[in-house]
Image (cartoon, rainbow, N blue to C red):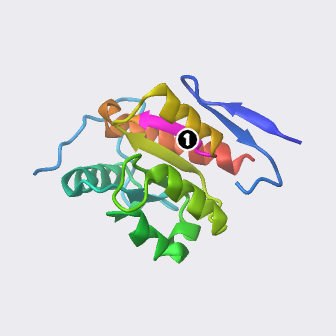
Amino acid sequence: MSQTIKLPGNSKVRCAPESNLGLPVRFPASRLMGRPEEGEANPIRVLIVEDDANYREIVSSELAWHGFAVSSFANGNALLGSLDAAAEADIIVLDWRLPTISGIDLLLQLRQRSVNVPMVFLTSHTQPANEQLALERGALDFIDKTRGVEALASRLRQVVQADKHC
């Protein structure tokens, strides 16, 4: 039996038991999204695939500041070469436009290799057709880079929590 969990905005996570499915910039913490306590148990393990080295470093640092355990990769081939890391992640964040293999093709290749963790896109290519294609192919969210890391951190937590309830 399939279950749908609604996330803030228009995002939904569809769950099915059988599913196969530069300087760092500090964003101020809000009352809703403060910095977690040091040594928080079981941080969410995030893998980021982003070809822009400066942006990748900023996002990785900011997510770590928000309590995530972050590993990053410069391209899809690097992630495909680390399938053990991918399989142990709680969530994977993909850029749409990557060298050698696009984010949308990387999503498919990861699924073909039985990596069944939630995947979301963090991209500046936010055309509705891209979002629709990503969601049709199994991405659970599609986030505009301009939203900032605090919004990303919040959405990643929501997707992981929803996935745990599936």
Badge 1 local density, few (<14 within 10 Å), some, or many (20+)? many
The number of numbered discs placed on residues in the rendered structure image is 1
Residue 146 position in % (x across, y down): 30, 31
Vertical position of residue 114 compared to residue 108: above or below: below
Q: Residue at x 41, y 42 (%)?
A: 122
Q: Is residue 128 magenta?
A: no
Q: Is residue 99 left or right of residue 18?
A: left
Secondary structure state at the residue bearing disc 1 = helix
Instruction: Give amino acid for label 1.
Output: Ala
Q: Is residue 100 left or right of residue 81?
A: left
Which of the 4 quarters of the picture holds residue 75?
bottom left
Residue 92 position in % (x across, y down): 50, 55
**What residue span does the magenta drawing correspond to?**
138-143
Which residue has dot 1 on it?
Answer: 134
Q: Residue at x 37, y 35 (%)?
A: 125
Q: Is residue 29 left or right of residue 10?
A: left
